[in-house]
Image (cartoon, rainbow, N blue to C red):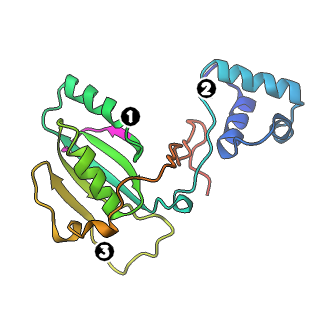
Amino acid sequence: MSQDLDTVDARILDIIQRDASLSVAEIAERVGLSSSPCWRRIKRMEESGFIRGRVTLIDNRALGLDFEVIASVKLSLPSRANLEAFEAMTQNWPEVMECMTVTGAVDYMMHVVTTDMHAYDNFLRDKLLGRAPQARSARLTIPRHSGDKPARGRAPRRSARYGAGSPRSAATMRPGADRLASLRQAKPRAHRFRYLLPWQGAASP
């Protein structure tokens, strides 16, 4: 644990991670402090950078954003200039929730959310491979969430690979009548993941 934090600070951070909407009085009651010293601890941790901000988690499905994928992106040349240009471009794409630089066969892993497969195809053709000259190819992987019923035996890998010049498959060539032109105006950007602090050990169920 950081020398600037004690066990009470750690408990406060754990509570805020679970529910950032709690009042100072509610947090203070849970850690056994009065409101004033609890508020001072929170303020100190905000000023010191331990607390960077608080967010509201949005239900993507309630907004009609039902299609969630992980796109593995390979650049044509992973030079510093190309990396910086690509990262700057992704900042303006509302479909991209997260974009991480990785090592290995690809250069980026992107968490992308759209309304459906057709909207993702539009994003892929019009933005990722159409507007970003640095991107050479992208592999699509559909994540399986814990709430999904597992199939018997080994589940098949659900992925598809697209290159900058590859032809469209029959599955992506449906007429424009059922193709969504763009993502809905709602742009959820809050991370859905609760990050584990070093001293917390295994994640709580």
Q: Residue at x 25, y 62 (%)?
A: 159
- CA separation, marks 1 and 2? 24 Å
Magenta part of the chain:
99-106
For the residue pair 53 and 124, the one nearer the viewer reads as: 124
Q: Quadrant of the C terminus?
A: bottom right
* Residue at x 20%, y 28% (from the top left corner): 82
Q: Secondary structure at mark 2?
A: loop
Report crowding for label 1: few under 14, some 14 to 19, many 20 or more residues within 10 A (C-alpha): few
Does label 3 or label 1 sit earlier along the sequence? 1
Horizontal side of residue 76 vs 99, given as left or right: left
Percent of width and height locating residue 88: 33, 29
Q: At which x and y percent is residue 20? A: 69, 41
Nearer to the camera, 159 or 29: 159
Q: Amino acid at mark 1?
A: Gln
Taking the spot 51% from the left edge, 69% from the top edge, the residue there is 147
| Marks 2 and 3, the one that precedes in the sequence | 2
Q: Find residue 91 and name its label.
A: 1
Q: Does residue 121 belong to the magenta stretch? A: no
What's under tag 2, amino acid-wise? Phe
- Above or below for 48 versus 201: above
Q: Would you say 87 lies left or right of 98 here?
A: left
Q: Is residue 104 magenta?
A: yes
Per the rendering, the mark at residue 50 is 2
Q: Which residue is mark 3?
A: 154
Is the residue under label 3 in contact with that under label 2 (CB below 8 Å)? no
- Residue 38 in percent (x, y) is at 81, 28
